[in-house]
């Protein structure tokens, strides 16, 4: 029987892996075994971090809202509770943007939350 080596398909398969490792440092983009390990690990990190990115942005928005609310004499939790009681339906991303780009509107939201809580 003839010995099959899969020359061309195997080369194409390796080329696909090496393209995935483009930009990695040193042997991580040059050596076949290291490339495979590095790319698989990179895929795992990218899968994990697509989910972590959402958490990190939410944390950032909360920090911004808390800072803006404290400048106006409220804590974050009091502010959010006041908005919920006042039935103001703005998510944290929107509140963060308002706090940064439109302080006058944020002042009104704080007053609204204070009036409901008092």
Image (cartoon, rainbow, N blue to C red):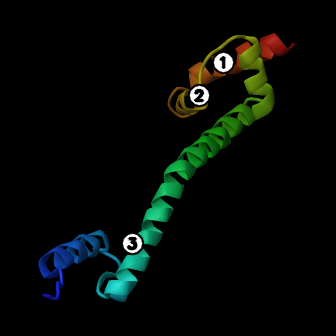
Q: Is residue 20 above or below residue 118?
A: below
Quadrant in the rendering for residue 11: bottom left
Name the spot of residue 80 as percent of width and height, x first: 73, 25
Q: Secondary structure at mark 1?
A: helix
Decide which of tag 3 and tag 2 comes sooner along the chain: 3
In the rendering, which numbered label is found on residue 39? 3
In the rendered image of this protein, does residue 95 appear above or below residue 109? Answer: below
Q: CB of mark 3 within 8 Å of CB of mark 2?
A: no
Q: Residue at x 64, y 45 (%)?
A: 59
Question: At x 37% / y 85%, what residue is drawn?
Answer: 33
Q: Is residue 43 left or right of residue 15?
A: right
**Rendered image: mark on residue 95:** 2
Task: Residue 55: give x, y in percent of width and height.
Answer: 60, 46
Q: Which mark is residue 51?
A: none
Looking at the picture, tell me which residue is in the foreground, 49 or 1.
Answer: 1
Number of numbered labels in the structure image: 3
Q: Quadrant of the C terminus?
A: top right
Residue placed most toward the observer, 23 or 40? 40
Estimate the x, y position of residue 112 in percent, counting from the top left. Answer: 71, 13
Residue 74 in sight: no
**Disc 2 and disc 1 in contact, CB within 8 angstroms:** yes
């Amino acid at each position: 029987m003839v010995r099959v080596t899969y020359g061309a398909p195997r080369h194409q398969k390796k080329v696909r892996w090496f393209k995935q490792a483009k930009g990695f440092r040193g042997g991580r983009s040059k050596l076949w075994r290291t490339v495979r390990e590095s790319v698989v690990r990179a895929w795992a990190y990218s899968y994990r971090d697509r989910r972590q990115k959402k958490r990190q942005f939410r944390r950032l928005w909360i920090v911004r809202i808390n800072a803006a609310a404290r400048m106006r004499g409220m804590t974050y939790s009091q502010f959010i509770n006041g908005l919920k009681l006042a039935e103001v339906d703005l998510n944290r991303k929107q509140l963060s943007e308002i706090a940064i780009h439109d302080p006058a509107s944020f002042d009104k939201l704080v007053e609204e939350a204070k009036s409901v809580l008092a």
